[in-house]
Image (tube, rainbow, N blue to C red):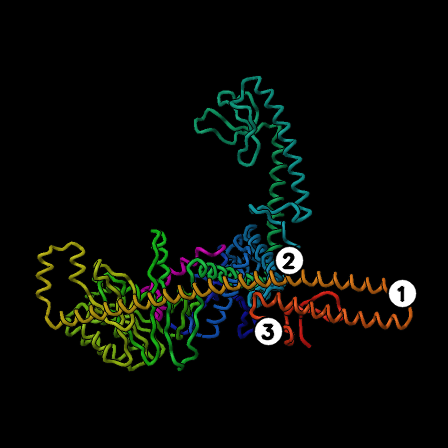
């Protein structure tokens, strides 16, 4: 945002916009989130591919993990709305907008004029802000509407400046009446000069003086190409020669006055253009703060839609957060992937294996073990980058994510040795660990790859356990990878710790890259060496040299993995059978429903036919009674007798109707007595009934 600041003497100072693009929390060092170690810049580069244009690039470059929960949630909710908007096929068109922040900084200097293209860039910002103010007005996207509505009203400014600068950066003649007059004069004079030169062309061409029959321009003056050896035959001013020297570009004396006048007009045109640019610059300078705000808002909108498109392309979710500091912390990542690995495998038409990473208090330590090249380091980086993405307002490449808010993500990953600093790999790791020990607290996430390596295994394991104990006591959430058996045992004995294994297929002797919680991993170094083609004799010898206790422990781990795999297979089989039963149940229900509807349809048809026959018979009976009344006269005695007969006939007709209905209902639904009970029962909504005083049936729609 652009805000005017005032010094103590009341002078307005407009800070450069580039100094005000800051999305991280003040006071936090830039490296407290291990951005480079976790390849966070690579994630931003992925998102960059979904930006519409340059206007949002500075905001993306400034994107950093933050620690204010409400701010993080606002970012995710804005992106969530943008994703819903994308699903409806709508996205603001912002691709033509340039990054106008340098132009706004230029306008901060009083009296400084902008170029035509710079002015055009700001006019396009104003136009885009005008168009976006109402884009989300009647939509359910309240956050997008609030953001877009935060721009000023630029309708007057756009009306005044729109179309005055052409796309190629030329000031249009409509920019001022004086400019239009000057350009009309220039065009008239050019026609006059060209007409005079064309007459000379025809005359000199016949005389064989010309090198070519064209009119050229040199030094902004119209000239003719004359043969060098014939220059004495034409009186004029030479303005240059060809590279070979065979052609001279000569301005005939007949057109010198016209060219002089033309140059003067062009100078006046240039001066008027500069005056117009200065005038337009002043108009924009008066709205500089509004334009800076609009630039920021348009950039935020474009970034939100870029993040939404990233979420769609990489199957991301919007994370939940564990709450305020001091609350119970959960780190849950379901089906999580590292987007950079995802992208690399996509290019090879392959898919990455999603991971399940879960730490729930009081468990705050996960020790990941398993084979080399099995994916342990990727698991660490994936967890770390997911946290950074979530706290930077980026969707997480997972099916579900629930995370604490960390004030530090401290990573010691990779070979840190430095020849220049005279550091071995072990020394570099120790220095990194010391820097982490100094700052890690309850709200820190610690990631350490191959902890306790690069030194004597016994000492390395002891040192690793001591470091992990320190982080456990400080309350930091910690994920580490290791090959040390002592660390696996430590995890099994420590209530706050959990083992996790990168799965290894004992049949193919290849890693599956699945992370299995609750089990220690098997390093499988000899098996991998065998798969990679090491001399079989050497492999066999190595197996005989393994410490018996280590071999026994490895065999136990392998057996546990086999049992877990068997349990998973059995669970998958049960789940599959359950799905099949559910599908069969649904099919039977659908078949039953189809049969029921068919029977009801047939029943309805038969009842309609029965009713029709009954009504026809009743109408014939009534007609006969009326005919008898007319034939026998209108005596009261006769009428009473006929009325009694009509009542008797009506009763008989109703009894016959009820019997036919019962017979019809009884066929598909059971016995006649059952049907009679149903007929006598109180009607329900949806029942087919016949009202006594009406001659047609109906369906009960409601009960009063």
Q: Is the magenta stretch mostly helix, strand or loop?
A: loop
Q: Magenta span has 494?
A: no
Give the label on residue 673, or none.
3
The percent position of residue 51, horizontal first and vertical second, equals 47, 56
Residue 472, compared with residue 177, is above or below; it is below
Magenta part of the chain: 29-52
Depth check, front residue: 169 or 137: 137
| Nearest to N terminus: mark 1 or mark 3 | 1
SS label for mark 2:
helix
Q: Horizontally, is 341 left or right of 275 in the view?
A: left
Looking at this view, is 83 or 118 the one in front? 83
- Can you say which quadrant of the picture contains the C terminus? bottom right
Q: Quadrant of residue 581?
A: bottom left
Residue highlighted by disc 2: 157
Q: Residue 632 carries which label?
A: 1
Horizontal side of residue 357 vs 131, given as left or right: left
For discs 2 and 3, the disc positioned in front in the rendered view: 3
């Amino acid at each position: 945002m652009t805000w005017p600041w005032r010094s103590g003497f009341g002078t307005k100072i407009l800070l450069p916009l580039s100094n005000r693009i800051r999305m991280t929390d003040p006071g936090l060092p830039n490296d407290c989130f291990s951005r480079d170690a976790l390849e966070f810049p690579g994630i931003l580069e992925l998102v960059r591919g979904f930006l519409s244009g340059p206007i949002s690039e500075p905001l993306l470059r400034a994107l950093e993990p933050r620690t204010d929960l409400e701010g993080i949630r606002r970012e995710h909710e804005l992106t969530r709305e943008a994703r819903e908007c994308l699903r409806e096929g709508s996205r603001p068109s912002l691709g033509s907008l340039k990054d106008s922040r340098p132009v706004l900084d230029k306008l901060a200097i009083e009296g400084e004029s902008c170029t035509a293209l710079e002015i055009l860039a700001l006019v396009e910002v104003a136009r885009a802000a005008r168009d976006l103010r109402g884009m989300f007005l009647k939509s359910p996207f309240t956050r997008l509407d609030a953001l877009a509505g935060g721009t000023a009203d630029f309708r007057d400014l756009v009306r005044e400046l729109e179309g005055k600068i052409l796309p190629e950066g030329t000031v249009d003649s409509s920019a001022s009446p004086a400019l239009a007059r000057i350009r009309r004069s220039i065009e008239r004079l050019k026609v006059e000069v060209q007409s005079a030169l064309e007459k000379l062309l025809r005359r000199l061409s016949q005389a064989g003086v010309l090198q070519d029959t064209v009119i050229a321009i040199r030094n902004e003056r119209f000239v003719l190409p004359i043969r060098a050896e014939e220059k004495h035959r034409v009186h004029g001013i030479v303005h240059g020669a060809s590279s070979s020297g065979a052609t001279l570009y000569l301005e005939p004396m007949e057109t010198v006055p016209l060219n002089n006048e033309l140059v003067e007009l062009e100078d006046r045109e240039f001066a008027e253009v500069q005056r117009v640019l200065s005038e337009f610059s002043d108009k924009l300078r008066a709205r500089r703060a509004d334009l800076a705000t609009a630039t920021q808002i348009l950039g935020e909108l474009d970034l939100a839609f870029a993040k939404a498109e990233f979420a769609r392309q990489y199957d991301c979710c919007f994370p939940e957060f564990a709450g305020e500091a001091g609350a119970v912390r959960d780190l849950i990542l379901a089906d999580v992937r590292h987007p950079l690995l995802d992208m690399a495998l996509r290019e090879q038409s392959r898919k990455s294996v999603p991971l399940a990473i879960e730490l729930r208090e009081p468990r705050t330590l996960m020790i990941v073990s398993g084979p080399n090249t099995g994916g342990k380091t990727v698991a660490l980086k994936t967890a770390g980058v997911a946290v950074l993405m979530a706290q930077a307002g980026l969707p997480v490449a997972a099916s579900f994510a629930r995370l604490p808010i960390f004030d530090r993500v401290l990573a010691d990953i990779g070979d840190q040795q430095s020849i220049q600093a005279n550091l071995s790999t072990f020394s570099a790791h120790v220095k990194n660990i010391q820097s982490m020990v100094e700052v890690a607290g309850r709200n820190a996430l610690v990631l350490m790859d191959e902890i306790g390596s690069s030194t004597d295994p016994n000492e390395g394991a002891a040192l690793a356990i001591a470091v992990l104990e320190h982080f456990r006591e400080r309350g930091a959430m910690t994920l580490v990878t290791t090959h040390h058996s002592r660390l696996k045992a430590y995890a099994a004995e420590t209530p706050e710790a959990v083992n996790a294994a990168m799965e290894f297929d004992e049949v193919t002797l290849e890693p599956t890259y699945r992370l299995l919680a609750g089990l220690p991993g098997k390093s499988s170094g000899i098996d991998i060496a065998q798969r990679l083609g090491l001399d079989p004799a050497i492999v066999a010898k190595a197996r005989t040299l393994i410490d018996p206790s280590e071999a026994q422990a490895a065999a136990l781990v392998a057996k546990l993995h086999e049992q877990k795999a068997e349990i998973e297979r059995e669970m998958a089989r049960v789940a599959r059978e359950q799905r099949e039963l559910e599908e069969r149940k649904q099919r039977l229900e659908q078949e039953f429903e189809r049969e029921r509807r068919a029977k009801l349809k047939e029943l309805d048809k038969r009842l309609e036919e029965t009713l029709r026959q009954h009504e026809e018979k009743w109408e014939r009976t009534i007609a006969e009674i009326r005919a008898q009344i007319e034939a026998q006269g209108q005596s009261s005695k006769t009428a009473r007798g006929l009325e009694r007969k009509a009542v008797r006939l009506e009763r008989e007709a109703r009894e016959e109707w009820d019997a036919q209905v019962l017979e019809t209902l009884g066929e598909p639904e059971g016995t006649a007595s059952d049907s009679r009970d149903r007929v006598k029962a109180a009607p329900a909504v949806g029942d087919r009934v016949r009202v006594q005083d009406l001659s047609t049936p109906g369906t009960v729609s409601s009960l009063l």
